[in-house]
Image (tube, rainbow, N blue to C red):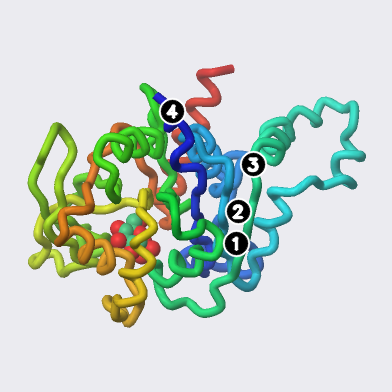
Amino acid sequence: MKNKNIITNCLFPAAGYGTRFLPATKAMPKEMLPVLTKPLIQYGVEEAIDAGCDVMSIITGRGKRAITDHFDISYELEHQILGSSKEKMLDDIRGIIEKCTFTYTRQNEMKGLGDAIYKGKVLVGDTKPFSVILADDLCVNPDGDGVLTQMVNLYNKYKCCVVACMEVPIEDVHKYGVIEGNQIEDGVFMISNMVEKPDNDKAPSNLAVIGRYILTPDIFDVIEKTKPGKNGELQITDALCEQAKKGMVIAYKFKGKRFDCGSVDGFVEATNYFYELEKTEK
Ligand code: G1P
């Protein structure tokens, strides 16, 4: 089931430096790193379109212009390959550009994910729920709906914030926002507590938040009142924890697979996965 267009806006925080991929990310946004021939952020945009979104709101920063150019027509290039076999390689991105509106604003300073999302208020407005995709978490579900579509369906049922989560080995919990909560239906948890990147031995569980969120617009008021947390940054996890205390956030153990493309290992894993998939489809 699609979302009957309640959630039409998807926010992409994309201002981070991507230092784990230096030198590749010195002059190129990490979101433009290609898994096979498609940049990471395009996978995210396609997942958002599948979930019923048609406005992509991107939080960029200095050195991120390639993202804006990617989601625009390239007349010179298109003229060059007109009538050649290469033309079809642009079909998907052309379709995306036709279907969607792209809006942008910059996060001038790296003050954390909560701050990046707050910067998006001017793009997504404060009257409707919206989705958030962190493009370096690449998600696939070969057996059914995409991860964001699954979450939108859940939003339609519970009408509150939804975060995607997965079980991770306890030695990895310090890399994530971690949740504590009661299971209310299979794979769905009412969150009572959330901690950003806890020490492994202090984590409330091994259920880690991954980069997919559905947020209700009241989150902006909560972010305004949230103090900087882990690493001195404004954390969306802390703002969501406030909402969770009012019983307004659920975590969803999504169906599918997530690649951590913010790490070299995860990126290679995703590349191999899509390469094998492409080979079997040919
Ligand atoms: C961010 C969030 C964290 C979440 C993670 C998912 O951290 O702050 O809560 O678990 O994304 O990828 P980052 O990986 O940007 O440090």
Residue in the picture at 63% in, 73% down: 62
Q: Is residue 223 above or below residue 280?
A: below
Q: Nearer the viewer, residue 227 or 166?
A: 227
Badge 1: few (under 14), some or many (20 or more) residues near its Cα, within 10 Å? many
Residue in the picture at 69% in, 48% down: 71
Residue in the picture at 65% in, 47% down: 101
Mark before the other along the chain sequence, 1 or 4: 4
Distance between mark 3 and mark 1 Cα atoms? 21 Å
Q: Nearer the viewer, residue 49 or 6?
A: 6
Q: Is residue 219 above or below residue 70?
A: below
Badge 2: few (under 14), some or many (20 or more) residues near its Cα, within 10 Å? some
Q: Is residue 238 above or below residue 37?
A: below
| Discs 3/2, front | 3
Q: Which residue is mark 3?
A: 100
Q: Is residue 152 above or below residue 137?
A: above
User: Total of numbered circles in the picture?
Assistant: 4
Distance between mark 1 and mark 2 Cα atoms? 5 Å
Distance between mark 3 and mark 4 Cα atoms? 17 Å
Mark before the other along the chain sequence, 3 or 1: 1
Q: Which residue is mark 4?
A: 2
Distance from mark 1 CB to nearest ligand 1 atom below 8 Å: no
Asked if the residue under mark 2 is in contact with the one under mark 1, i.e. CB atoms within 8 Å, the reply is yes
Q: Position of residue 172 (x, y in %)?
A: 22, 58
Mark before the other along the chain sequence, 3 or 4: 4
Asked if the residue under mark 4 is in contact with the one under mark 2, i.e. CB atoms within 8 Å, the reply is no
Amino acid found under the numbered disc labelled 2: Met
Q: Which residue is mark 1?
A: 29
Residue 228, by quadrant, is bottom left
The answer to whether residue 154 is left or right of residue 68 is: left
Asked if the residue under mark 4 is in contact with the one under mark 1, i.e. CB atoms within 8 Å, the reply is no
